Image (spheres, grey):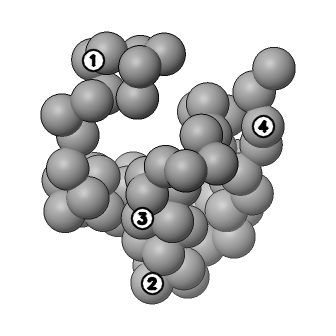
Amino acid sequence: MQRYPLWQDSMPDRLHISTQISMEELMLTGCTTTSDHRYHDPNDYQLDERIEAATVKGIISMPVAAV
């Protein structure tokens, strides 16, 4: 992503694992719903990875478009 150069090297597998860990930590506290405030690029694979990882863990994840 050109907007955030730091994220350009984030690979799908790393993003998937980090999202799953985050979801597990939330679920340990009793959280069942979360929102993702990260900037979403329509052509970005990362949104799909985050949604899929959250779905696998069974938590409700709502992507929110940043403006």
Q: Are the residues flagged by discs 2 and 1 in contact, CB closer than 8 Å? A: no
**Reading the chain from its start, which is encountered first: label 3 or label 2?**
3
Residue drawn at the location 43% of the way across and 57% of the way down: 45
Q: Quadrant of residue 13?
A: bottom left
Q: Is mark 2 on a helix, strand or loop?
A: helix
Name the disc covering residue 56, or none. 2
Q: Are the residues flagged by discs 2 and 4 in contact, CB closer than 8 Å? A: no
Disc 3 residue type?
A: Glu
Residue drawn at the location 51% of the way across and 65% of the way down: 48
Kindly tell me whether residue 9 is visible in this rendering: yes
Category of crowding for the residue at label 4, using alpha-carbon neighbours closer than 10 angstroms: few (below 14), some (14–19), many (at least 20): few
Q: Is 63 on the left or on the right of 44, as rendered?
A: right
Residue nearest the observer in this picture, 28 or 59 = 59
**Reading the chain from its start, which is encountered first: label 2 or label 1?**
1
Q: Distance between the residues labelled 3 and 1?
A: 18 Å
Q: Are the residues flagged by discs 3 and 2 in contact, CB closer than 8 Å? A: no
Q: Is mark 3 on a helix, strand or loop?
A: helix
Check disc 3 and report the residue beneath it.
49
Residue drawn at the location 61% of the way across and 30% of the way down: 39
The percent position of residue 29, horizontal first and vertical second, equals 53, 55
**Reading the chain from its start, which is encountered first: label 4 or label 1?**
1
**Reading the chain from its start, which is encountered first: label 3 or label 1?**
1
Check disc 1 and report the residue beneath it.
6
Q: Is 48 on the left or on the right of 12, as rendered?
A: right
Q: Are the residues flagged by discs 4 and 1 in contact, CB closer than 8 Å? A: no
Name the disc covering residue 65, or none. 4
Q: Is mark 1 on a helix, strand or loop?
A: helix
Disc 2 residue type?
A: Val
The percent position of residue 32, horizontal first and vertical second, equals 68, 67
Quadrant of the rendering where the C terminus is positioned: top right
Category of crowding for the residue at label 1, using alpha-carbon neighbours closer than 10 angstroms: few (below 14), some (14–19), many (at least 20): few
**Reading the chain from its start, which is encountered first: label 4 or label 3?**
3
